[in-house]
Amino acid sequence: MKFFVDTADTADIRDLAATGLLDGVTTNPSLIAKSGRKFLEVVEEICGIVDGPVSAEVVALDHETMMKEAEILRKIADNVCIKVPLTIDGLKTCKALTDEGTLVNVTLCFSANQALLAAKAGASFISPFVGRHDDNGFDGMALIGDIRLIYDNYGFDTEILVASVRHPIHVLESARIGADVMTAPPAVIRMLSKHVLTDKGLEGFAADWAKTGQTIL
Ligand code: G3P
């Protein structure tokens, strides 16, 4: 399963990229606002840090203006992936852009039928929001399972990008189901490395090593 980080914080992206874990980055208008930086500048900087897809979202609601925004965004770098909302205008934009060979991530997906539409429109990625689905009393991971089943039934190439990931169990379940990608905030990715027995083991080794009175350096 590929790991994308869901942030516009370039310090976090650089730090995680150094671990070799990062296969891409996702941003959205809320994350850009949180960064306090200019949208186009921050996307350009992120594209220079990671080789994989960097999702940059259009903000227009109509197809014609989405295409104009996408034109500007895709000129930033070859690894820009245009993020469009799961609306009829977003799907038209998805079809037009993917026909031209541009990567497209269809976002704000909350049902398996929406995911089916995105695949039929040729999306490179579909982003079902599991955390927000859970928040509203639905089963986010069941949605991922349904999309996996449907895409496999028909051999769609669209990659399932699990979004709105809030905790390590979302990551574990995504991998069990066979999602192609998950995108999570930096804190959740770092949390995956944590285990109480790892910490306890390190404490024990450090204490025993101190008893030897030796140093390696
Ligand atoms: O980038 C889309 C998605 O990952 C947002 O997550 O936590 O705002 O629901 P969240």
Image (tube, rainbow, N blue to C red):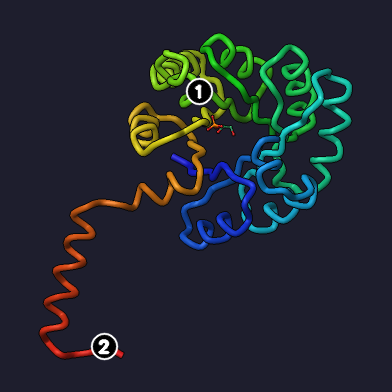
Circle 1 is placed at which residue position? 132
Residue 152, relative to residue 187: is it above or below?
above
Circle 2 is placed at which residue position? 216
Which one is in front in this view, the residue at disc 1 or the one at disc 2?
A: 1
Q: Is residue 163 left or right of residue 77?
A: left
Residue 120: x percent and y percent? 64, 15
Residue 37, relative to residue 213: is it above or below?
above
- Residue at 26% of width from left, 88% of height from top? 216
- Residue at 72% of width from left, 56% of height from top? 45
Q: For residue 117, what is the image quadrant?
A: top right
Q: Amino acid at mark 2?
A: Ile
Residue 114: x percent and y percent? 59, 12
Q: Residues within 10 Å of mark 1 (few under 14, many from 20)?
A: some
Q: Is mark 1 within 8 Å of ligand 1?
A: yes
40 or 51: which is nearer to us?
40
Residue 191, relative to residue 165: is it above or below?
below
Q: Residues within 10 Å of mark 2 (few under 14, many from 20)?
A: few
In what element is the residue under mark 2? loop
Which quarter holds ligand 1?
Answer: top right
Q: Amino acid at mark 1?
A: Arg
In what element is the residue under mark 1? helix
Q: Earlier in the sequence, mark 1 or mark 2?
A: 1
